[in-house]
Amino acid sequence: MTKVPGPLEVLRDVAVRLDKENIPYFLVGSLASMYYGRPRFTKDVDLVVQLHPSLVQRVTQIFPLEDYYCPPIEVLKDEVVRRGSFNLIHQQSGIKIDIVLYKDTEYHQSEFSRRAKVEILPQFEVYVAAPENIILKKLDYYREGGAEKHLTDIREILAGSKVDDEYLQLWVEKLGLKTEWGKI
């Protein structure tokens, strides 16, 4: 009986494919939050990816249908041009990979420049967003939906990681997250 890969194994596969093609990325979402905080159940992988429109056709070759469901080329082109997002689905496990496309803003430039390559599994390194950027995104998610799990994740990150308070305060102010930060 074949073992079905979990989120970390799927992350490894996706990261290896992106690294091989020199496509910049970094991990965000629950897996990144768990790296800095506490483990919790998740069945998806969230990545921010810098994908140039000239590489859209290549994406379907990097992630062939026998391994991943990938949206049609027309959908990919639209999402890349508007800097939106799309999903890949790992065929064997059903794990969803949310690909959020890099936006060229002051905040996103800062976020991308602060990513770090870390060892997630033995002999496997992946780029991960800085803890401050995970916190800021979790604050934004909390603002959008009010889910307490985001505040819990933030508290766990703060308890388990050293953070740059000055950077965090700067972007809490700039992104209008003072009310949400006050709940921490």
Image (cartoon, rainbow, N blue to C red):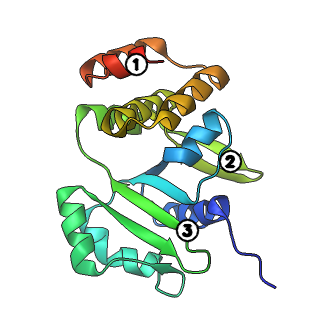
- Count residues near mark 3 (Cα–Cα under 10 Å), then give few for <14, some for 14-19, many for 20+: many
Q: Amino acid at mark 1?
A: Trp
What's the mark number on residue 146? none
Which residue corresponds to mark 2? 120
Query: Nearer the viewer's eye, disc 3 or disc 2?
Result: 3
State if disc 2 and disc 3 touch (CB < 8 Å). Answer: no
Identify the residue position indicated by label 3 in the image.
95
In the rendered structure, which amino acid carries the disc numbered 3?
Ile
The CA span between labels 2 and 1 is 28 Å
Q: Quadrant of the N terminus?
A: bottom right
Label 1: state its secondary structure. helix
Query: Could you say which quadrant of the image residue 179 lies in?
Result: top left
User: Closer to the observer: label 2 or label 1?
Assistant: 1
User: Which amino acid type is marked by label 2?
Assistant: Ile
Q: CA distance from mark 1 to mark 3?
A: 32 Å
Query: What residue is shown with label 1?
Result: 181
Q: Is residue 142 left or right of residue 106?
A: right
Q: Residues within 10 Å of mark 1 (few under 14, many from 20)?
A: many
Q: Is residue 116 above or below residue 67?
A: above
